[in-house]
Amino acid sequence: MNSGEQQLRDSMENEFGEKTDDEQLHRTDDYQAYLQAIHERSGIHLSTKTRPMWYKWMAAASVLLIGAMLFWLGGYNRDKKHFHAAESVSMIVLDTLFIHNTTDLSKTYSLADGSQVTLYPGSKIGYLADYGAESRYLTLTGCAKFDVARDTIRPFVVTAKGYSTMALGTSFVVDARSNNGLEIKLLTGKVVVKSSRESTFKMEDQYLVPGEELAIDVGRFAVKKLLFGKLKKPKEKPATTPTKIENQEMPIGYLDFEGTPLSEVFDEISEVKDVQVDLSAVNVGELYFTGTFSEKDDLEQMLKIICVMNGLVYEKTEAGIIVVKRKP
């Protein structure tokens, strides 16, 4: 050891404490002792506890294990979401039936409720698999003619381009082939055309009589009612009070109306249901109704159907009188 090293060692020992006699100036233990003394004089308190190497390897392995689990769980959740999405799409496909006329000629199809649909070339309808059981809703792409079987409980509804056409027992044509809108032509009976949340624009309910055509122009936000042929007059009823049909197909207890003036319809219902119907608030002279009811049908259901088809509303009074008036 030269004189310079000896002098430095003596200075460090005098400043920070005596050390064991050792020829090596740069011992690791000496440096640790010197550093600890410097920290104490400076007011710095550090933990000198060190962790063994195996602890560091365990921590690293834990990080890798957690990362692998998160990756696996993420993939599982993605697969699970994909499975549910695929399952949902599958359910929609299974629950919805389609009829698509891919030929160059119009074709007529019969539905479960007895209604018939004549699809024009390239047109398509969609309906739920339980069509006719609880409801009779169809979607239309293209053009079709509908001959609707009578049903007093389940109205027949066709939706095209966000607008719905509702009927009971009637025949009409819906043409949605144009990009600018659609047309509804009523051949027999009566229908009401309504807008919905999916409609390009909202409109008031439109009621059609035979021979009328409703043209909806979605580009111009316009609705026009036209005559496409000679108006058919309602079938005249005998001067006597309408009688109940009595035959093999329609047993006693059914009320059948075909182009019947609305005043006569309410008179018949009033007699069968033993309730007074007040028509003083509305002029029903030009209104007619086509449909069939059973005497067992609920009075409110009968009134609702008749009023909806004619743009009317009704209300009950404490005296048990049904007051019919125009829909506000």
Image (cartoon, rainbow, N blue to C red):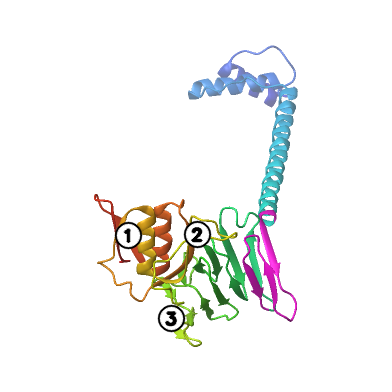
Check whether the beta carbons of the residues at disc 2 and disc 3 lie within 8 A of each other.
no
- As rendered, which of 255 and 123 lies closer to the eye? 255
Element on which disc 1 rests: strand
Task: Report if residue 311 is visible in the image.
Answer: no
From which residue to which does the magenta span run?
94-120
| Amino acid type shown at disc 3 | Ala
Q: Residue at x 52, y 58 (%)?
A: 154
* Residue 321 x/y as whole percent: 27, 55
Specify few, some or many for label 3: CA neighbours under 10 Å numbering under 14, 14-19, or 20 or more: few
The residue labelled by disc 1 is 314
Toward which corner of the image does residue 307 lie, by quadrant? bottom left
- As rendered, which of 239 and 126 lies closer to the eye? 239
Whole-Å distance between the Cαs marked 2 and 3?
A: 32 Å
* Residue 57 x/y as whole percent: 75, 28
Of labels 2 and 3, the one closer to you: 2
Specify few, some or many for label 1: CA neighbours under 10 Å numbering under 14, 14-19, or 20 or more: some
Element on which disc 2 rests: loop
The residue labelled by disc 2 is 152
Quarter of the picture containing the N terminus is top right
Indicate yes or no whether the magenta region holds residue 253.
no
| Amino acid type shown at disc 1 | Tyr
* Residue 72 x/y as whole percent: 73, 39
In the rendered view, would you say 143 is above or below 253?
A: below
- As rendered, which of 91 and 34 lies closer to the eye? 91
The residue labelled by disc 3 is 222
Whole-Å distance between the Cαs marked 1 and 3?
A: 30 Å
Task: Report if residue 28 is visible in the image.
Answer: yes
Element on which disc 3 rests: strand
Specify few, some or many for label 2: CA neighbours under 10 Å numbering under 14, 14-19, or 20 or more: some
| Amino acid type shown at disc 2 | Thr
Of labels 1 and 2, the one closer to you: 2
